[in-house]
Amino acid sequence: MSTESSKALVLKACQCIHERNMTKLLDLLHDQATWSVPYREDKFQFAGRRDKRAFQEMVGGFLSGFTSWSFTPTSVTAEGDRVSVEATSEGVGPGKAAYKNVYNFSFLIKDGKIHTVREFFDPFEVLAYVEQIPA
């Protein structure tokens, strides 16, 4: 894929995250896609490497709890089949639980689909959000 095609594909994925459209997002992922949150799994329950199905379960569950949500890319850099995205998010819900974070994603494109994703963010913001969710 060209650099511009890779960048366009990743920006479509970002739009799917913003819209919380898991069906469209999964369509953009390669059948052998992996999505990694490279933190210590013994310290952060959302860390680890997930295949497409496990990614759907984790992120779909996380996004479904928000009554309002935004995900906004702030910077995109692409070179061939590699794309880097900086982004911000904000969400509210369930109830008054509030979430805000910054991200850096590294995407690798293969066969016209997103094949490998490494997602970096502030894990303490995630933990602070989870603590606010009513039991």
Image (tube, rainbow, N blue to C red):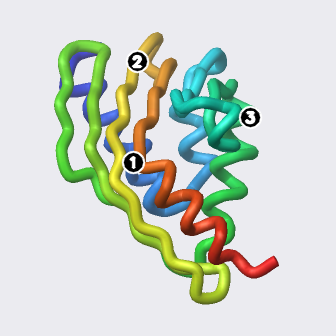
The three-letter amino acid code for the residue at tag 3 is Ala
Q: Secondary structure at mark 2?
A: strand
Name the one closer to the observer, 44 or 21: 44
Q: Secondary structure at mark 1?
A: helix
| Number of other residues with Cα within 10 Å of mark 3, as a class: few under 14, some 14 to 19, many 20 or more | few
Place of residue 25 in the rendered image (x, y in percent of width and height, measured from the top left): 54, 43
Q: Please name the residue that numbered disc 2 is placed on.
A: 109
* Rendered view: 67 above or below 130: below
What is the spatial separation of the Cα atoms under label 1 and label 2, in whole angstroms?
14 Å
The three-letter amino acid code for the residue at tag 2 is Ile
Q: Quadrant of the C terminus?
A: bottom right
Q: Please name the residue that numbered disc 3 is placed on.
A: 54
The three-letter amino acid code for the residue at tag 1 is Cys
For the question of whether residue 84 can be seen, the reply is yes
| Number of other residues with Cα within 10 Å of mark 1, as a class: few under 14, some 14 to 19, many 20 or more | some
* Rendered view: 90 above or below 84: below
Q: Quadrant of residue 70?
A: bottom left
Q: Please name the residue that numbered disc 1 is placed on.
A: 14
Q: Residue at x 20, y 38 (%)?
A: 76
Q: Secondary structure at mark 3?
A: helix
What is the residue that sits farthest to the front in this orientation?
A: 43
For the question of whether residue 69 can be seen, the reply is no
Q: Quadrant of the N terminus?
A: top left
* Rendered view: 40 above or below 14: above
Looking at the image, is mark 2 or mark 3 earlier in the sequence? 3
Name the one closer to the observer, 41 or 67: 41
What is the spatial separation of the Cα atoms under label 2 and label 3, in whole angstroms?
19 Å
* Count of numbered labels shown in the rendering: 3
